[in-house]
Image (tube, rainbow, N blue to C red):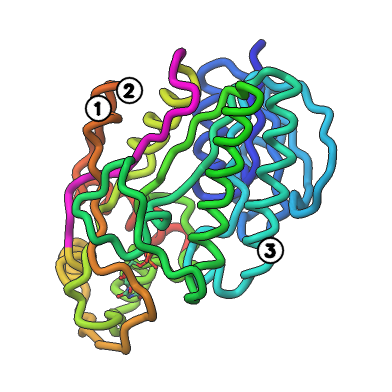
Amino acid sequence: MKKVLITGVAGFIGSHLADRFIKEGYKVIGIDNFLTGRVSNIKHLRNNQSFMFIEKDLGIEEEFHIDADIILNFASPASPVDYFKYPLETMRVNAFGALNMLKLARKNNAIFVQASTSEVYGDPEVHPQPEDYVGHVNPVGPRSVYDEAKRFAEALSMSFYREFNTRVRIIRIFNTYGPRMKSNDGRVIPNFITQALANKPITIYGTGKQTRSYCYIDDLVEGIYRVATMDEIDGEVFNLGNPEEYTILQTAEIIKEITGSTSKFEFLPALQDDPKRRCPDITKSKRVLKWEPKIPFREGLVKTVEYFKNNG
Ligand code: UDP
């Protein structure tokens, strides 16, 4: 039986990856310290023979002895609210956690997938963003704890690839949404749905003219599964996201409509260094992975709203 190690397994994306790999016949070994992940996300796997869990903080340099064919390195706070709250933990896990897992991947000759982010492009000056755009990041701004940590994890991954031929693949994940997001994690989709369901004001930071492009979790997981299982893509970087772009105001209007909410819009000050436009160029992922998102925004939102209604 093939084995996959998933760090950050109790997180939103990590827990969905565990489900997918178990479904595909893998044994999943999951690691999490529950800093921002939740027990409830992996509760259903507790008695599953194909799942093993290790509670551990990856934020110190340490040698691991785990047999794995694939390592998916997803441990990190990922919501702006979370990484503003845990700046040092975010930097530690993206440095030492990535180093620990890269060393383990090298030892096992395992495939190593580093979860990176569209944040490495910063507040982009190129639109949409292809993988070879090097970004526009403020290294001392409030978001740098995440942006630079992920950029470091990418650089470290590429060093292992160049130095030791470690089987590295990097994915840059754009805004993703779906069941198992925390209602209070501060990101736009959970915030707006929670506010709309309670008929409370929908909080719009700045003008609401900034854009994001939202990928439903099942589409993202399919992309990650391909990156983790394909041959001959070592050392490659892939954007994974949905290229359909919406302003924050449009996002609020759609969510208000789907929930049948009477919420009003409340305009609050813009966040510092908030990217003004974000949209993935997925030409490379389409060509190499034969992947593109399939789930329309409204359809994914309906499923997500259902989750928040039942788990609010
Ligand atoms: N946003 C907003 N109201 C909220 C939460 C977020 O207007 O209650 C905006 C935020 O300013 C940003 C966008 O929505 O422009 C996406 O923010 P999110 O925190 O989801 O993640 P980001 O894409 O910035 O990493």
Front residue of this view, candidates 276 and 12? 276
Q: Quadrant of residue 9?
A: top right
Asked if the stretch drawn in magenta spans residue 265, the answer is no
Instruction: Report which residue position mark 3 lands on.
Output: 89
Q: Tell which circle, 3 or 1, labels the residue nearer the N-terminal end.
A: 3
Look at the image and give the residue range highlighted in magenta.
Answer: 231-246
Asked whether 43 or 125 is in front, the reply is 125
Q: Secondary structure at mark 2?
A: helix
Q: Is residue 184 visible?
A: no
Q: CA distance from mark 2 to mark 1?
A: 6 Å
Q: Write down the residue under mark 1.
A: 286
Q: Nearer the viewer, residue 14 or 149?
A: 149
- Residue at mark 2: 289
| Membership of 236 in magenta stretch | yes
Q: Whole-percent x and y of residue 73?
A: 60, 39
| Residue farthest toward the top in the current orientation of the protein | 1
Badge 1: residue crowd in 10 Å (few <14, some 14–19, many ≥20): some
Q: Secondary structure at mark 3?
A: helix
Q: Residue at x 25, y 87 (%)?
A: 267
Rendered-image quarter of ligand 1? bottom left
Is 195 left or right of 163, judged from the image as shown? left
Q: Amino acid at mark 3?
A: Glu
- Residue lying furthest front: 163
